[in-house]
Image (spheres, rainbow, N blue to C red):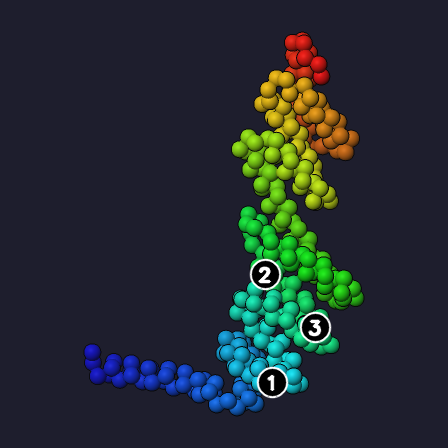
């Protein structure tokens, strides 16, 4: 290694050590006022990890003092900005319980819900956090009915419910694709109970009919009369609800085949 390269490497290490030592020195001073001032400065500059470290150092010392409210609030936000949403939800909730009369409490309650919203995964995964976020947003709406954030809460609730609906549909569709038609019927029907105002209700109800038809078609002969009758009943309900359905051609084919099956069963001596 040449002397010039060695010298530059030495200087770089020295500078890096110097910067680190300065921050570490600040942490070790025990000067609460200086620590809090610098924590606020780092927070304002977007250096959330450094701000978080200094807030953690002083929060115990300023408990019960006027400055603790904003410091704790900022600390909760450092968790959020660092993507630690489970912790940010916890600390925003803790803030609300510690500072009951704070003007920041409304925002903390919203951010508690929003942190859980950020934890909501793809619709293909478990939706526990989605349901938790919905509950938190609904609690916020009930607690702050005149808040400017109500519209945003409702929009996010709709978004989360849509995701949960997509998961429910995917699960029902999986049963259908696996030819487990009885479970498919049950899953699609539960979807309609949970999401009665779904914009996909026509599609879901059509899938119930398809599943019922294939369930009947794959049943033992003694069970077929009752199950084909269920198909016809569901189709009548569907026609009344959606007289101009886009599934008209498919339903006509199902009805034709179902009538044919029922006629064959009658001819074989089975009663519908």
Q: Residue at x 71, y 70 (%)?
A: 106
Q: Residue at x 64, y 58 (%)?
A: 133
Which image quarter: residue 95? bottom right
Q: Earlier in the sequence, mark 1 or mark 3?
A: 1
Q: Nearer the viewer, residue 255 or 72?
A: 72
Quadrant showing the N terminus:
bottom left
Horizontal side of residue 143 vs 228, given as left or right? right
Horizontal side of residue 169 vs 238, given as left or right? left
Give SS at disc 1. Answer: loop
Horizontal side of residue 208 vs 148, given as left or right? left
Residues packed near mark 1 inside 10 Å, few (<14), some (14 to 19) or many (20 plus): some
Residue 62, label in figure: 1
The span from disc 2 to disc 1 (Cα, nearest Å) is 31 Å
Give SS at disc 2. Answer: helix
Which image quarter: residue 166? top right
The vertical placement of 177 against 166, above or below, is: above
Instruction: Please provide percent x and percent y for residue 60.
Output: 57, 82
On the image, numbered disc 2 is attached to which residue? 118
Nearest-to-viewer mark from 2 and 1: 1
Is there any visible trace of residue 236 in the rendered image? Answer: yes
Residue 105, label in figure: 3
Is there any visible trace of residue 256 in the rendered image? Answer: no
Q: Earlier in the sequence, mark 2 or mark 1?
A: 1
Residues packed near mark 3 inside 10 Å, few (<14), some (14 to 19) or many (20 plus): some
Discs 2, 3 touching: Cβ within 8 Å: no
The span from disc 1 to disc 3 (Cα, nearest Å) is 19 Å
Residues packed near mark 2 inside 10 Å, few (<14), some (14 to 19) or many (20 plus): some
């Amino acid at each position: 290694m040449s002397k010039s390269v060695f010298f530059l490497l030495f200087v770089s290490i020295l500078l890096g050590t110097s910067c680190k030592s300065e921050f570490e020195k600040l942490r070790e001073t025990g000067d609460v006022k200086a620590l809090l001032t610098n924590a606020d400065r780092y927070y304002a500059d977007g250096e959330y990890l450094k701000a978080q470290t200094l807030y953690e150092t002083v929060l115990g010392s300023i408990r019960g003092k006027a400055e603790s409210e904003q410091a704790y609030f900022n600390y909760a936000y450092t968790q959020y900005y660092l993507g630690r949403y489970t912790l940010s939800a916890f600390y925003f909730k803790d803030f609300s319980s510690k500072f009951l009369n704070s003007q920041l409490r409304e925002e903390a309650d919203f951010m508690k819900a929003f942190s859980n919203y950020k934890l909501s995964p793809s619709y293909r995964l478990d939706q526990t956090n989605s349901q938790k976020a919905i509950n938190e947003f609904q609690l916020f709406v009930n607690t702050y009915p005149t808040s400017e954030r109500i519209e945003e809460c409702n929009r996010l609730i709709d978004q989360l419910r849509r995701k949960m609906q997509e998961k429910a549909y995917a699960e029902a569709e999986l049963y259908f694709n696996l030819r487990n038609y009885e479970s498919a019927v049950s899953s699609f029907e539960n979807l309609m109970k949970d999401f009665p105002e779904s914009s996909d209700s026509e599609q879901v109800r059509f899938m119930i009919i398809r599943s019922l038809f294939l369930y009947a078609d794959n049943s033992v002969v003694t069970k077929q009369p009752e199950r084909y009758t269920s198909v016809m009943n569901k189709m009548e309900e569907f026609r009344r609800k959606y007289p101009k359905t886009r599934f008209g051609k498919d339903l006509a084919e199902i009805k034709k085949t179902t009538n044919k099956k029922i006629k064959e069963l009658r001819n074989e001596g089975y009663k519908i």
